[in-house]
Amino acid sequence: MMNRPEPPSGHQFRIEENDSGTTLAWKHRPNDPIRFLFGGYYFVFGIIFIFMSYSDFTRAFNNQENTFDIFRMLGPFIFLIFFPLIMLLAYLFLKRNRLEKIAFKGQELIFQDGKGPISVINFHWLGKKRHNFNPISFVFSKAKSYSFNRSDVDRIILEGFGQQQRLRFDDGAVRVEIGEYLREPEREWLFEQIQQWRSAGDN
């Protein structure tokens, strides 16, 4: 195990050490309590209106000779088409964070990406995802893992751009960020752990 300096004050890392190595985990996206309000709203809205639509549809179906009731069936029918979308929105707001992880295991470093719920008050996330948000990928994508040995871990770099900082590596034509929503001291500490693990192989 590495002789690790203490993480920054108020850090969000979960550190697990065992015989197979050390794993650092953290939330992919910061907590956003407002999302529970939106998620609850969509969920309750969907449940209430599914019962109202069912009631209207039943009354209209049992009274088919009444032209008004036949047209009245269109409202519930249209709602039922959009009901899955409403429930999907509720799920995207209420889903749990999938933790990001870095595992130091012997001669291998493994990074597993994370995924969080839709964020309402995180303007950084909204700005980045506004033009390239893919709902299908957001819902169904599985965790991706990337492996490094000590000789190629230098692909992971800490760099500044503009007023920001990022810890990243390139996977082919795809640029992957590590700890995108960590604070700068946390990101710097994480990079230090990666460099320390690499240097340990030279001893």
Image (tube, helix red, strand yellow):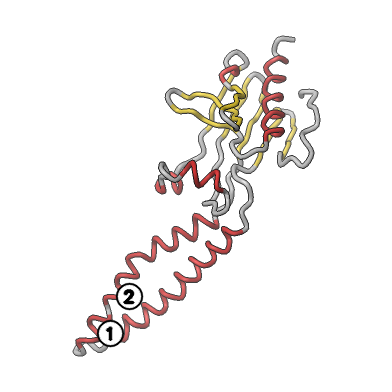
Determine which of the numbered discs, if any, sits on residue 60 in the image.
1
Q: Quadrant of residue 67?
A: bottom left
The image quadrant of residue 35 is bottom right
**Numbered marks: total:** 2
Can you tell which quarter of the image residue 98 is in?
Answer: top right
Which mark is first along the chain, 1 or 2?
1
Task: Tell me which amino acid carries mark 1.
Answer: Ala
Q: CA distance from mark 2 to mark 1?
A: 10 Å
Q: Amino acid at mark 2?
A: Pro
Q: Is residue 16 above or below residue 71?
A: above
Q: Quadrant of the C terminus?
A: top right
The quarter of the picture where the N terminus appears is top right
Residue linked to disc 2: 76
Give how far across and how far down residue 124 sits, in percent.
55, 43
Nearer the observer, 9 or 155: 9
Instruction: Return the residue found at the far front.
Output: 162
Residue 189, position in %: x, y? 72, 29
Residue extending farthest to the top is 202
Dot 1: within a 10 Å radius of its alpha carbon, few (fewer than 14), some, or many (20 or more) residues?
A: many
